[in-house]
Amino acid sequence: MQKLENYLTQQASNLSDEVSHTLREVAYARIKDALYHAGLTPGELLSEVKLSKLLGISRTPVREALQQLAQEGLVQVIPGRAVTVASRSVKDVLDVIHLRSLLEPELARLVAESALPEHVDLLEKTILQMEAALAEADYSAWSKADAVFHETMHTACPNPLLGETIVLLRNRVHHLANTDSRTNHARLAACTAEHRRVVAAVSKRDAAEAESAMREHLVQLRI
């Protein structure tokens, strides 16, 4: 739990607008952020009591947040009420990428056809953030910008069910992929370029190119 403790302590002052959310929502957002970006190990034990103390939130909202994260596949609840960071096999990861390759190009096509100007602006801003993080070798910042990119694509999709399904798929293995590639500068550079191609197509309202660019990005994830 040391990495988790350090990360949550560092991030405490960076969070805003928490007063407008329930305690469960705050616990959910902060634990999920840590699962994505704190470098936790699959199978690592998560203590409900320790999390409650670190977050300054009572155990019931923390327990509810962990239950929601379990439903999304980010944590696993094992007999005896222990909770761990989710573990996935290579096959699990490849299965998720396969499903994403079937669904996410269609999402990109729909986004290119219907994204609002504010969505396009945010996508372009996020690419600049990814490029800046890459230049500074700030892999945590890159990961956060990548998460915003995909969340924005989901939000911009006119088919909410499609967007939500893809988010759930990414959630199942996202933290594992980050663990493997967090310091692979060459791969992150290529991934940034792939994201930029998608955004360029969305900006031009080129649905066919956006679909093709996203499909190629997902092909590269399998390599």
Image (cartoon, rainbow, N blue to C red):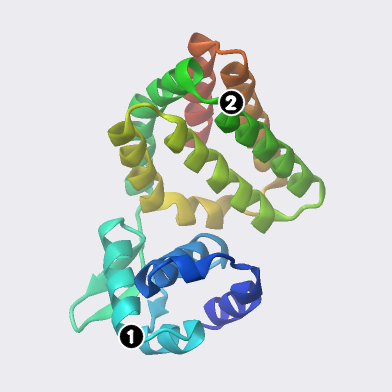
Judged left or right of residue 138, residue 78 is left
Residue 43, labelled with which disc? none
- Nearer the observer: mark 1 or 2; the answer is 2
Instruction: Identify the residue at the far right of this view.
Output: 136
Measured as percent of width and height from the top left, residue 106 is found at 38, 21
Which is nearer the N-term, disc 1 or disc 2?
1
Mark 2 surroundings: few (<14), some (14-19) or many (≥20) residues within 10 A:
few
The residue drawn where x is 55% and y is 10% is: 206
Judged left or right of residue 81, residue 95 is right
26 is higher (above) or lower (below) than 95: below
Q: Amino acid at mark 2?
A: Pro
Q: Nearer the viewer, residue 65 or 78?
A: 65
Residue 59, labelled with which disc? 1
96 is higher (above) or lower (below) than 44: above
User: In the structure shown, which secondary structural element does the residue marked by tag 2 occupy?
Assistant: helix
Q: Quadrant of residue 190?
A: top right
Q: Amino acid at mark 1?
A: Arg
83 is higher (above) or lower (below) than 172: below
| Mark-to-mark CA distance, 1 and 2 | 41 Å
Measured as percent of width and height from the top left, residue 197 is found at 63, 22
- Which residue in the protein does label 2 denote? 117
Instruction: Identify the residue at the far front of this view.
Output: 20
User: In the structure shown, which secondary structural element does the residue marked by tag 1 occupy?
Assistant: helix
